[in-house]
Amino acid sequence: MALDLIKATALLLALSLLVGLNARVWRQRLLARQIVEGLIYGGICVVGMMMPITLAPGLIFDGRSAVLSMGALFGGPVAGGIAGLIAGSYRLSLGGTGATVGFSVIALSVLSGLALRLLIRGGKVREGFFAFLCLGTVVHLAALLLFMTFPSALARQVLDELALPYLLTLAPATALLGMLLLDLERRRATDEALVASEARMRAITEAIPDVLMVIDEDGRYRKIRAPDSSLLAAGIDRLDGQLMSAVLPPDKTALFQRYIERTLKSDATEVLEYSLDTLAGPRVFEARARALDITFEGRRAVVLLTRDITERVRLEQEQRIAAIAFESQQGMMITDAYSVIIRVNKAFTAITGFSAEEAVGKRTSLLSSGRHDAAFYRAMWARLHADGAWEGEIWNRRRNGEVFPERLSISAVRSSQGLVTHYVAAFMDITFSKAAEDEIRRLAFYDALTGLPNRRLLSDRLGQTMAVSARNGRHGALMFIDLDDFKNVNDLLGHHNGDLLLQKAGARLRDLVRETDTVARFGGDEFVVLLADLPERSIDAAQQAERVAEAMLAALNRPYVLDGQTRQISASIGIAMFAGTTHSIDEMLRRADLSMYESKQLGKNRLQFFDPVMQETVTARLRLEDEIRLGLERDEFVVFYQPQVRDGQGIVSAEALVRWRHPGRGFVPPVQFVPVAERAGLMPQLGRAVMDAALAQLSEWSRAPATSHLSVAINISAAQLYQDGFAESVLDALKRTGAPPTQVMLELTESILLGDIEGAIAVMQTLRSHGVRFSIDDFGTGYSSLGYLQHLPISELKIDRTFVRDLPDNESNIAIVRAVVGLASAIGLSVIAEGVETEEQRASLAAHGCHVFQGYLFARPLPADEFAQLLQDGARADA
């Protein structure tokens, strides 16, 4: 009997194992699991019936009732039904006296198990050992009652021998089997919950874009899951199981190690923002970590979720920049798609005067100045819609009504669907820059003193007038006007009054012409008048131009009141007529200039039309200018020397005079090329060449005993004297040639005194301090101020040849000679007379106190070698 019970217990344990295995195998397929479970329960019953307790043939006892009731309870109708069908079929196949009762017990067990299942599912009974024990007791008591249907002798035997062991064994066995199966059921439910939970967690972690890492306290990667491996510092296969120090830079390793330590000490989630060079390049991450309850090989660890926030950081940075930019010095305005203002910055208020409260909610027409027409705004919006942006200058109105210019930039903001949602406008007040531009334009195209158009604007208008003339066939006239002797006004009355006269002269000219004509200041004391739209017939056009020019002469001749003094000045006018664009702008200006120059030559205070003969003169002059330039390059200019003789001493000095040895024309006299060189601005270059040659010759003479006493007089022009660095260039030439400065006399004409006299004195004093002397050439023929004369560092006055020519017969010239000699003696200057050609002239000069002479009476200008020969032969040097 005991052995049979042990066998039954073994079957129950086998049943538990098989049911548990089946649950794991068919975890995802419920029906299959229930079918197989029914087969297991049925099979166990069959095995049990093969090893029964047999009281009589056909009367067997086993644990099938416990198995079937628990099978129906835990397996449900499918498993219970299959198990009951298998067990019942097998029992019927065994036959015997108790076959019917046995089948009934099988059915009763299945139904009892299903009934308890319903009660538990309905919440009427709580599953557990007591419930299972009650089920086992009820089933087996019912089975004992069924056994009573056996024949009386057999029934009595069952009751006597088996009832108590049967009930005491199988009822607890049923409860025990129930607890085993309940434990299996709970384990299975737990496993399924874990599997489901793991599946859910896997789905969640795979769905999130974050990198998941488990890192222990040593900094070793224990687990890594990354939706995008390019967000890691290295590949997953390289990171897994490695220490951070093996793959990360030292600074990042230290940062993460501190972060892990902080997380392990904290009960909360720790956050860290960091940057890292990943496989995708530099990225910014935000990490969130918590300590894990589990350990890895005894090491504590943290689970870390890190998210790529590079784009967010970039956007935040852009937003910060945008916020800063929004509060910049530029006015900022944001509107909706319908031009309703929704936000402005402080600069907007500062520029427009409208506060945010006054502007927000209003349309941008709030700022409209009314200066722009509808076409302007249509073009602006068309460009804005086409390009998404517009930039330009616009006039707007401030809150106080003031209209001001601004530089405006508008950008459209579009949604992801491409629809405009907002407009952002940035603008700056350009009132001052606009005024500066106007001032620059005025300075660029208008004369600062008179306010008249300058040379640049004149050229532009002349070109336009000539183009219009070519289209309509009407004439135009260009008048070049020069104020006669204007320099005297500057020198006598000062530059302030000179400027005032120019302003008044310009105003008088402007009053005489039409709005379509142009009066321009060309420079200095020169004006140019452009008359447009003159008659088509040339004779009529010329007559109209002549009438205007005569009116201008008359207007300019009217007295000027300058600082309470009345002054009068005349003008010379040159007129060049044109029709169309036959000639260039420069050519027209040259023609008018040439005509003006001709009117001055004819006596000033008159007008002169351009004559083709003038053009020939100009052409010849320009050709001569080119030849002079070429001659300077080829060293064609040579220096001759004319003796200067003192009574009783002979030749004491020489004047250096330039001569041009032209390869085609022979010797060209100075009177032909010097004025042209002055007009062309070539005198400084020519003067330097003469200076260098004369000083080199003086240096050579100073080293020879026969000529060491000689001085050399060198003529310098006003252009040379007023040239920057003139004194330094002379001193450099003296040093370079070795000529003695005390034997150098620089001759100046009186016209130099009409320029910057203070500047001239400064230059002369610089050279005088080094021993260089100065002489006033042609004294008495021009303007000279005795007040300035006594302050000039000069040593000598040269009497002009015009006062020598008629001596000794002209009493006026004799008086002038006496006056010059007396003046020179009074202020300690020596005197020399030029142009002495006769003995009578020399004697007359000597009689009146002049004892140094220069002229053909003694010698003509000679080359240096002939001059030296003259010294050797002995020149006549006294009366």
Image (spheres, grey):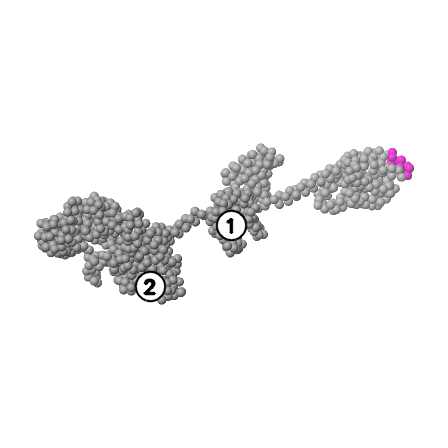
Callout 2: SS: helix
At label 1, the amino acid type is Ser
Above-or-below relation of 114 to 394: above
- Between 312 and 794, the one nearer to me in the picture: 794
Callout 1: SS: loop
Horizontally, residue 376 falls left or right of residue 807, namely right
The secondary structure that most of the magenta stretch takes on is: helix
Quadrant into which the N terminus falls: top right
**Residue lying furthest right:** 152
Q: Could you say where residue 424 lies in the image, as x and y percent from the top left?
A: 53, 48
> Which quadrant holds residue 141?
top right
At label 2, the amino acid type is Gln
* Residue linked to disc 2: 543
Horizontally, residue 65 falls left or right of residue 505, namely right
Write the residue at 57% across / 52% down. Answer: 418
Above-or-below relation of 9 to 609: above
* Residue linked to disc 1: 368
Q: Count the labels in the image.
A: 2
Estimate the spatial distance between the alpha carbons at disc 2 and disc 1, rounded to whole Å: 53 Å
Comes first in the chain, label 2 or label 1: 1
- Between 531 and 585, the one nearer to me in the picture: 531
Write the residue at 15% across / 47% down. Answer: 822
Q: Which circle marks residue 633 in the picture?
A: none
- Between 212 and 699, the one nearer to me in the picture: 699
Q: Could you say where residue 508 lies in the image, as x and y percent from the top left?
A: 34, 54
Instruction: Give the magenta-colored segment's residue range.
Output: 150-160
> Which quadrant holds residue 236?
top right
